[in-house]
Amino acid sequence: MLRKTVWLLLVVLLTAAMVLSSCGTEETTTTGTGSTVTGSTTTPGTTTTPGTTTTTPTSNLVKNAMGKMVEKPQYGGTMNVIWTDGTPTKNWDPVVSTTSQWGCVQMYETLGQGDWTKGPQGTNEYPFASTYVPDPYLTGAISERWEVVDPRTIIHYIRQGIHWQNKPPMNGREVTAEDIVYSVKRAKSDPRNVYYVIPGTPEDKQLKVTALDKYRVEFVTVDPDARKVHSTNQWIIVEPKEAVEKYGDLSDWRNAVGTGPYIVKDVIPDSYALFERNPDYWMNDPFFPENQLPYIEKIKALVIIDETTRLAALRTRKTDWAGIPWDKVKGFRETNSDLVIREMPADYAYCLFMRADIPPFNNQKVRQALQYALDEPGIANEFYQGDAEILGWPIHSFFPDEYTPINELPANLREMFEYKPDIAKKMLADAGYPALKTQVAIQSTWQQGLDIMALVKQNFAAAGIEMEIKTYEPSSLVSILYSMTYPGLIYIPWTNNGIDDAFGWAHGGWVGKDGSNSVYAFSKVVDPVAKETYEKMMAMVTFAEQEKVRKAENVREIDLAWEVILPTPSAYSAWQPWIKGFAGEQGIGPDSPQVGGAIRHMWIDTAMRAKKLGTRE
């Protein structure tokens, strides 16, 4: 039932797998057999029903539920967004875990979601810089709350009064526990889904899901699973049984019907999708509890694959939001000074993976020497002009409770990121490699990566390391990566936006029942300590216990140096000044790209748009 996403962004996306997640919010002790976690999402009470578009002046400040003075939200308007791939326009069935997610996130919902009040516009406890949401920052969606009974069992309490969109054949009926049971069973039977169970798998080796009554669902995992809060909240998409039975599947957008804030109204494959507001959506704005979400009336999504064309659309105000590469930000600040731009860590890390199972890289001192020999500060400050993070691996910096910044590492580990070629040379000599020769594999079309490898080659030479750069076409690189037959080193980005991604999947924490490593353990790490630690953590019930284990394990794995960690450029999100109720949040989980799940909270200052563009749309 677990899933991991590795997006290898070798300039373009080389390959994708899935991410496993888990979620939760406020934890309170009960007299039962476990702990109860309650998600406090606003439920409709007295609701401000949207009518015609208003023209509230931007100076109209009001106090929100957090006690902050903010602009009063408006209803209406159309948000224009860009999809970088046309695949989502061609499959609208949520059972397809990857390809359908971009569009489906507007229509279908999961049991839990990120707690908007804990983000940048609320208490600022969590930056929402990634689509992964750790347990403490989760709240309820379809599930109002959940109870962790023991290391294998969790019970979800389904929120009463949520209805399917008023579209045949669902016709607005209420969501019940049986819908969740159906959704999991359908996912378990479809090989395109993360929950897929290989036919013939015994019942005792499958996730069990049972409707205890109309509004309670029990999940029992095969093994102790510390991530069951995350995985049940974030990866179970609630699907419409009657629609699947009528149409066979939901691939055609005309048959798609969910519980979400928007309804798909028109689609041109590989070109365009149009969504309109669901007038019966269940959720209210947590900052303005009297206001029903969403605020924006329509979403127009255009498929633009070419980066230059996407950036031109942002520059000419044809789109309301887009990501900007780090090296283009300065130009946008000069030409579009009113754009709102947020810098954040990328949700991936650049690393040199190495064959740690064979000489010379099965020697820890050799691996550490490569890190000492790398001029991370020089690359970050000179090549990336300061727009880069030096240490974003194994655990990413946007997980502050588990991450340890460089200045808080032990002295010997801090030195590894300060460029010490003389120390590197001595370590290699002591390890029996005074004149180390190696090769690095890299994608031939990734110019930025090639430029970086040229700098790395110079750095290594100062420590007596001779490195040959070998280029491969994308498909060939993927082949040697997954077969782990690359020559010595391979330079790739690795998406570690899940809290256990590196620990579990890259560094040997997760091991299959047959003894096999994860297919994403590209350095071929075999680490019995990681495996033992991972298994102990999986048996822990509380997130606080897990945090301590992760923090200690992260430091231990930095010391082991299974990969050479390189600076990773910052990510930038930009939006037009009339987009309000938004601070660059990347979603509310899971895999909701193009700020997907966050759109329900945004609103448009239509008067400002009209003043700048001459139109409110």
Image (cartoon, rainbow, N blue to C red):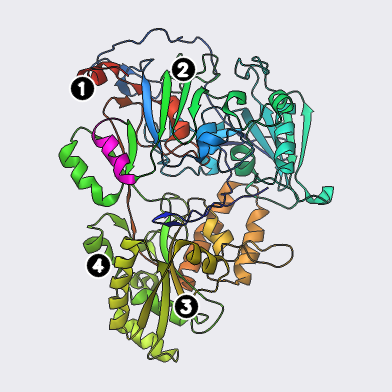
Between marks 2 and 1 in the image, the one whose residue lies nearer the viewer: 1
Whether label 3 touches label 4, CB < 8 Å: no
Q: Residue at x 51, y 63 (%)?
A: 478
Report the magenta stretch's main SS. helix
Classed neighbour count for the residue bearing mark 4: other residues with Cα under 10 Å, few (<14), some (14–19), many (≥20) = some
- Separation of marks 4 and 1 at Cα, in angstroms: 42 Å
- Separation of marks 3 and 4 at Cα, in angstroms: 24 Å
Q: Between residue 426 and residue 337, name the one nearer to us.
A: 337
- Vertical placement of residue 43 versus 336, above or below: above
- Separation of marks 3 and 2 at Cα, in angstroms: 57 Å
Residue 438: which numbered mark, if any? none
Between marks 3 and 2 in the image, the one whose residue lies nearer the viewer: 3
Q: Is residue 334 visible?
A: yes
Type of amino acid under label 3: Gly
Q: The residue tagged with tag 3: helix, strand or loop?
A: loop
Identify the residue position indicated by label 2 in the image. Answer: 289
Quadrant where the C terminus sits is top left
Residue 488: which numbered mark, if any? 3
N-terminal of the two: label 2 or label 1?
Answer: 2
Range of residues picked out in magenta:
307-318
Type of amino acid under label 1: Lys
Whole-percent x, y for residue 410 in the image: 40, 69
Type of amino acid under label 4: Gly
Q: Residue at x 34, y 86 (%)?
A: 425
